[in-house]
Image (spheres, rainbow, N blue to C red):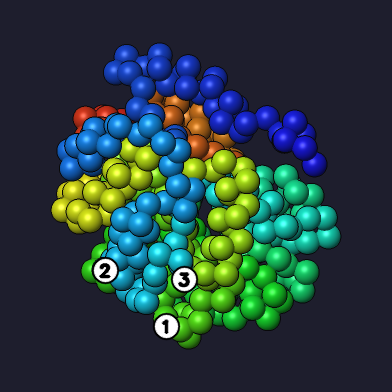
Amino acid sequence: MAVSDLADYPWDAVAPYAERARAHPGGIVDLSIGSPVDATPDVVSRALMGATDAHSYPQTMGTPSLREAIASWYDRRRAVTGLTPQHVLPTVGSKELVALLPLLLGVGPGDVVVHPRAAYPTYEVGARLVGATPFASDDPAEWPDNTRVVWINSPGNPDGRVLDIDQLRGAIARAREVGAVLASDECYAELGWDAPWDAAAIPSALDPRATGGDLTNVLSVYSLSKQSNLAGYRAAFLAGDPDLIARLLTARKHLGLMLPAPVQAAMVAALADDGHVSAQKERYRSRRDLLLPAVEAAGFRIDESRAGLYLWATEGRDAWESVARLAEHGILVGPGHFYGAHFPQHIRLSLTASDERIAAAAERLRSLAH
């Protein structure tokens, strides 16, 4: 399969509903795409400005200070000890890594790439790009023997599902049994809401309790887009098996997949400062506390959504009908059809709108209950 064979970009289908929502007298409330709206932290922007003398090519592997900052962050925030600079690698955002990982690992026709049933569509794109077979499954017992990459996503996008240590351990064991690389997309890990994740850290696939202290064939992927409002910086990284990291580094050198030097400096600052992360989490918490009961009052059931940036909801009808209904009230959401074939009656609502727009959405949703 070639890039030109990829299907039309799914979000283009939302455009007519966006137009309908914009016609609302109070304006559109766009809860469809999880793009941060809050300001980039000062500590990060100052670091970026201080690194603008970037006359040399940046290092694909990342500066020593960045690699050390990533390893330290995993230790401090994710309970993953013992990582060294050889265990980590910066990436140009996380989406390119998700799309390109099967290619970079040499996956091809006849191979299977597993991904969650409710899934970010780029997992499937990456599989189809190399001619592999995507397989949607959350049950390790279903994963076939020719699986070469297993994507897990915790907290999940779109559904906010969180995998505990036992589930991570089971996924890693089955991936190793079939000789697959397990790649864990953990980009929303700082955003836990419901017990126990409101107080306990959401575990990483690199957690020694899950790996048994052996990182072989296990990778963790993380992005600063959500926790630090750096979506425009394209600042992400992966960590795990140092042999896999070395293979990926070589491939990425050949392809020129390197982060700009100023962005690398900004990442060091972001990873060292936990204060802005806590402040951003509280912003999202207050928005969620306002939006969730309003969605329920409008006749929707909230499923999972225990962590992350989204509410995963259904009113028991086709998602496009729900999208149309909400668009009439100036609210734009994403249909479950975009996240695989298994949830055609769900919609995804993002928390990434301003306080004023979230309040407007909540008011409109409550009016639907009357």
- Name the residue carrying label 1: 209
Q: Is there a contact, CB below 8 Å, between mark 2 and mark 1?
A: no
Residue 76 - label: 2
- Name the residue carrying label 3: 205
**How packed is label 3: few (under 14 Cα within 10 Å), some, or many (20 or more)?**
many
Q: Quadrant of the N terminus?
A: top right
Specify which label sits upstream in the sequence, 2 or 3: 2
Q: Quadrant of the C terminus?
A: top left
Residue reaching furthest right? Answer: 110
- Residue 351 lies, with reference to residue 197, above or below; the image says above
Question: Identity of the amino acid at label 3?
Answer: Ala
Residue reaching furthest bottom? Answer: 212
Give the label, 2 or 3, closer to the camera: 2
How much space separates mark 3 and mark 1, taking CA atoms? 9 Å
Question: Considering depth in this image, is 352 or 47 the residue closer to the camera?
Answer: 47
Judged left or right of residue 233, residue 15 is right
How much space separates mark 2 and mark 3, taking CA atoms? 15 Å
Query: Residue drawn at (56%, 56%), measured in percent from left and top?
Result: 249
Question: Identity of the amino acid at label 2?
Answer: Arg
How much space separates mark 2 and mark 1, taking CA atoms? 16 Å
**How packed is label 1: few (under 14 Cα within 10 Å), some, or many (20 or more)?**
some
Q: Is there a contact, CB below 8 Å, between mark 3 and mark 1?
A: no
Q: SS at mark 3? A: loop
Q: SS at mark 1? A: helix
